[in-house]
Amino acid sequence: QVKLLQSGAALVKPGASVKMSCKASGYTFTDYWVSWVKQSHGKSLEWIGEIYPNSGATNFNEKFKGKATLTVDKSTSTAYMELSRLTSEDSAIYYCTRSELGAWFAYWGQGTLVTVSS
Amino acid sequence: NIVLTQSPASLAVILGQKATISCTASESVNKFGINLMHWYQQKPGQLPKILIYNEFSRAPGIPARFSGDEAELNFTLTIEPVEADDVATYYCQQGLTFPLTFGSGTKLEIK
């Protein structure tokens, strides 16, 4: 069955960067776009961007350009997201998801909690 | 950006009754005759779970109590009859244009 396994929680200092992973299994990794979604505490969901593992093509929410970098490692079926110049506003749970036709999300990783604090 | 305005922000419904959640899009989300509007359920401390995709298609395993509808730019998620297990926050999401956007959420409680 389809699974997306994300890396564990991270506590990072303001101004630093964090890189999280999302390991896919149960399907052909290169056939589907992988999206990343942010959920701040008690708030709604924000789409950050997506990457197509086969080519590395990306689409971004303008709000997160310069903040988020998306990459993949096809050899391990793993997607990565790096967030840079972290502030308290970046403290949130970050989910990776598999995009289906029509850009909806059937499969979600368990989420990575990022806490930005000195 | 396509803005999705959800209402109400919270809703209390008697068990067995009907819950109706609205999501109004700021512009069309139609592609080739299909409205790319999707609905999710998120229970406290859990992941979002897809309920309805492409306006009215139920995701696998989702009971018929959940249904989606549309009138112009106004989309609705209906839950009837409401069960205790439906306590959650519900989000709409459009899949037509970047950035993909979500509604602000509707919190469903049992009265």
Image (cartoon, rainbow, N blue to C red):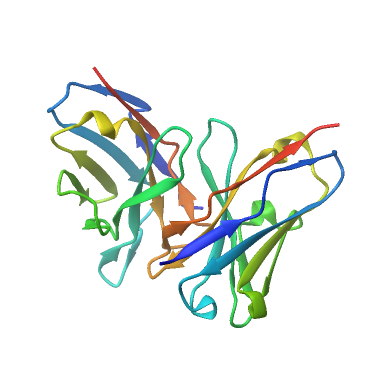
x and y, in percent, of residue B12 in the image: 27, 21
x and y, in percent, of residue A24 in the image: 55, 67
Question: Which quarter of the figure is the C terminus of chain B placed in?
Answer: top left
Residue A70 falls left or right of residue A29: right
Q: Nearer the viewer, residue B67 or B81?
A: B81
Q: Is residue A62 above or below residue B46?
A: below
Name which residue lies at 15% across and 49% down: B64
x and y, in percent, of residue B71 in the image: 20, 49
Task: State how many labels appear.
Answer: 0
Q: Quadrant of residue A59?
A: bottom right
x and y, in percent, of residue A73 in the image: 68, 75
Q: Nearer the viewer, residue A26 or A64?
A: A26
Name which residue lies at 27% across and 46% down: B75
In this view of the protein, can residue B29 be seen by the observer? Answer: yes
Residue B58 falls left or right of residue A77: left
Q: Is residue A56 above or below residue B13?
A: below
In this view of the protein, can residue B98 be seen by the observer? Answer: no
Residue B52 falls left or right of residue A41: left
Name which residue lies at 40% across and 51% down: B93
